[in-house]
Amino acid sequence: MRACARGGGSCYSETPPTKTACACDSKARPGLERDRGDGRRFVEKKTGAPSVQEGKRLGMQEFSSDGVRIAYLDFPAEGEDRGQPILLIHGFASNHGVNWLFPQWVKTLTRAGRRTVVFDNRGHGRSEKLYDPEAYRPQIMADDAARLLDHLGIARADVMGYSMGARVAAHLALAAPERIRGLILAGLGVHLIDEDGLPSGVAEAMEAESLEDLVDPKQRMFRAFADSTRSDRRALAACIRGSRQAMAAREIAAITPPTLICVGSEDDVAGDPAPLAALMRNARALTIPGRDHNRAVGDKVYKEGALAFLDGLKPVV
């Protein structure tokens, strides 16, 4: 999410807030111009919660993860299937559409011959909303991801998570390394171990009566982003309280799958990727030039680096 220059808020669109409407502007209208991440721009026809609409159009499916309803989409590879499926895990207050469909990740991966699975984390998008922070422990959210792979009959996959999704992916890699061929942690660097997740005050920002009641720029940023995706803010408050857990350095060192850590050079949320990579057995860092936490999501350097990393891994046997 980037801070909006007009209102101190944020939006999931990646445009400069000078001439076009942004999602944190209460007067935002259809025709929102957005950035694909490669310098090209396109006009999004609708604002609000596009993932839900897209999910309905594409026919999102659901399964039960230990009694919790999880919504997902399973996209087949285009052309010849490499037999190397990938699971994508979105970030806090986002959803499968905002994080992966709109920035063209699904298209990029399926066109590269990869079956691509996206889902809405518990408390997000079309998945079930829970209000107990204990239900959002990273280990529990990682179990959702593992059960989805089980549900789809995928024994081993590549896994990419962004921000909170990277935290979930790291816990999955620690608990079940045999399920992961390659791991991409994006939008999260050394703050995986030296800070308890997102900046403090995010839960309180979710619970505030309105954006206008908030002064802190980062509180406003996360609140406006949640409003733009029409999220259940009570569920998000529980989520951030339950998922704010730093991993220990020894846990990071125990992660065995090959790992790529991707962070924007201007990202003040994620932390430096290099120290995190240095703790791991088989990891390297990729800095995404000129991108902050939000604008890195669809960046060309990020996509090219991720594809090159995946191409260099050993085939699934």
Image: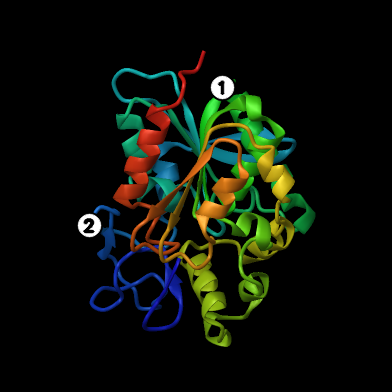
| Residue picked out by circle 2 | 39
Query: What colour scheme was applied to this rendering of the protein?
Result: rainbow
Q: How many marks?
A: 2
* First along the sequence among labels 2 and 1: 2
In this rendering, would 233 be left or right of 46? right
* Circle 2 crowding by C-alpha within 10 Å: few under 14, some 14–19, many from 20: few
Give the farthest residue toward the top: 317
| Residue name at image x 35 percent, y 78 percent | 27
Mark yes or no: residue 35 visible.
yes
Which quadrant is home to the N terminus?
bottom left
Residue 153, percent from left and from top: 58, 20
* Circle 1 crowding by C-alpha within 10 Å: few under 14, some 14–19, many from 20: some
Quarter occupied by residue 77: top left
| Residue name at image x 55 percent, y 86 percent | 215
| Residue picked out by circle 1 | 154
- The amino acid type, in three-letter code, at marker 1 is Ile
